[in-house]
Image (cartoon, helix red, strand yellow):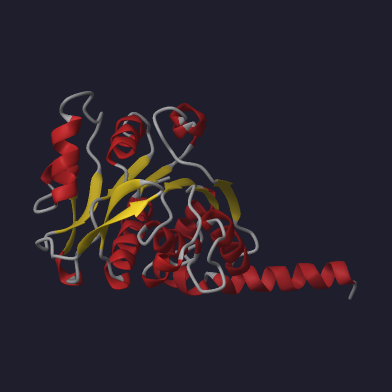
Amino acid sequence: MSSKLLNTFFHYTLNSELFHRAELVLGHETLERFSNLRVIIFGLGGVGSWCVESLVRTGFRYITLVDYDTITASNCNRQLPATSKTIGKLKTEVLKERFEEINPDVQISIRSEVYSPANAESFQLSDYDVIIDCIDSMQSKMDLIRRATKTDAFFISSMGAALKIDPLQIRVDEFWDVQYDLFARRIRKNIRKGELPSKQFPCVYSTEQTLEGSEVQEINGESKRINGSTAHITAIFGFTIAGEIVKHFSNTPQ
C-alpha cells in the first residue's frame, strides 16, 4: 500500500472512531449538522475555554476563537489552556493547537484581539450559525448582545461565574428572567438606557448568593477588582453552554 493510501486509510479510521460514541447518542445526521455549523466564541477564560473544548469533542469543526489575552499563572486554577508551560502564550494560539490535536479536521480561526464597539463590524456576525458570549466587560458584552440578537444565529451568553462554589445552583433562563445574578442585573439596568436586544436569548447563570472573595489590585497603574473563582463552576458554565447548543441543533430539523 502506498504512503498516500496508507495515510488516507488511517485518516478514515480516525474520523470514523473519533466521534463514534457521540454518534451513538446523537445520530449521524446530527453530527453531520454539527460539522457544518459556523461558530464564533468571544472570551476564552474559565467559561469559554471549556465550552469550546466540549464542542470540538462533539464534532463541531468551524470555530472562530476571539480573545486578546495571554495566559498568566493566575489562570491556572480554572482555564483550560493554562499550565505552567503555557504561561505567556496567547490563549487563542494554545487552544488552536490543542483542538487540532483532538481533531485534525477542525478548522480553527483565531482573532487575538479585544471585541469592542469600535471593531464589532469586522467580525461579520451574520456569517455565523452560533454566537457565544463569554465576555467579562459590561460595555462590550452589551454591544455584542445588541448585535448578535439582530442575526439569525443561535446566541447564548454567560453571566457571572465568579464567587460561586455550588454547581447545583447553575441554571439556564432567558435574559430577562435571570435571577440573583448581580452581573446580569447590572447589564439589564444599563441596556435599558439604550437599544434593547432584538430577540430573546438564553443565559447560563447561578442563583447562588455572591460569596465574599474579592480584592483590589493595581494593574498597569489602574485599580482593578479581582474576584475569586473555581474551576468546577467555570467549567460547568462552559459545558452548560455547549449542552444548550447541542440540544438546540439536535432538535432543529433540516
| Residue 181 position in % (x across, y down) | 14, 52
Task: Indicate left or right for 162 with 245 as reference.
Answer: left
User: Where 118 sits versus 22, above or below?
Assistant: above
| Residue depicted at 79% across the width and 70% down the height | 7
In what quadrant of the picture does the N terminus appear? bottom right
User: Where 21 sits versus 38, above or below?
Assistant: below
In what quadrant of the picture does the C terminus appear? top left
| Residue depicted at 47% across the width and 74% down the height | 21
* Residue 150: quarter of image: top left
| Residue 30 position in % (x across, y down) | 45, 57
User: Where 92 sits versus 176, above or below?
Assistant: below
In front here: 49 or 37? 49
Q: Of all residues shown, which one is farthest toward the top?
A: 194
| Residue 62 position in % (x across, y down) | 55, 50
Task: Indicate left or right for 14 with 242 as reference.
Answer: right
User: Where 114 sits versus 35, above or below?
Assistant: above
| Residue depicted at 16% across the width and 37% down the height | 188
